[in-house]
Amino acid sequence: MRQFDTQGDFVSAVVQEWKQQGQSQSLADALAQGFSRAESEIRAEGEMHEAGLDLRLGGWVLRTQDMPVIEAIGAVAAAAAAVVTPGGVATAALIAAISSFASLCWKAWRRGASLSRTEITVLGLLQTQGPMTDAELLAKAASGSEPGRDQQEPFEPA
């Protein structure tokens, strides 16, 4: 577990994880915007409750069990971006969609949801590409899947 004094330090550490996966700077920035927004919203919700019961007052924590989720979000975002923009040029709309996708997944995870790689993939594709048929979704999910990974392996919150 790593603890950070500021939200900026926390988000920078997450971005470094994605950069080690080989993500582009623009994709890492879009994901970072989503994470930053999600953390701010989660903390704002916590402030509405009685502060004496909020165990997350203070620093930002990146737990070991968060790492597979961070990796999966980055991998799905990269795959979705590749499906949408085969030439590699991300549009403003795609950046916004990826940022929203990262925020959605991170808030769900931090609130205790159990997310599988398949669920993260479906959320990512729907967020970046909009509504599609089951067949289209299946084809795009298959084209962006990671070989050798069990797509059903769930991420269980601690």
Image (cartoon, rainbow, N blue to C red):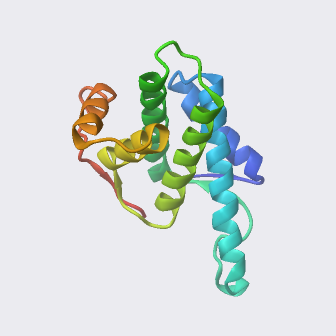
Can you give x and y, in whole percent of width and height, for residue 133 in the image? 27, 42
Can you give x and y, in whole percent of width and height, for residue 7 in the image? 74, 52
Query: Would you say 71 lies left or right of 95 here?
Result: left
Can you give x and y, in whole percent of width and height, for residue 117 in the image? 33, 44
Question: Where is 132 relative to 40, above or below?
Answer: above
Query: Looking at the rendering, in which quadrant would you find the C terminus?
Result: bottom left
Question: Where is 108 relative to 47, above or below?
Answer: above
Question: Where is 50 relative to 128, above or below?
Answer: below
Residue at 77% x, 52% y is 6
- Splitting the image into 4 quarters, where does residue 51 fall? bottom right
> How many numbered discs, if any?
0
Residue 15 visible in the picture: no
Query: Would you say 45 lies left or right of 104 here?
Result: right
Query: Would you say 137 lies left or right of 11 here?
Result: left
Residue at 69% x, 39% y is 12
Q: Nearer the viewer, residue 11 or 98?
A: 98
Residue 103 visible in the picture: yes
- Splitting the image into 4 quarters, where does residue 122 fall? top left
Q: Nearer the viewer, residue 139 or 112?
A: 139
Residue at 62% x, 47% y is 34
- Splitting the image into 4 quarters, where does residue 14 fall? top right
Q: Nearer the viewer, residue 89 or 6?
A: 89
Can you give x and y, in whole percent of width and height, for residue 144 in the image? 34, 28
Residue at 44% x, 52% y is 65
Query: Would you say 84 lies left or right of 51 here?
Result: left
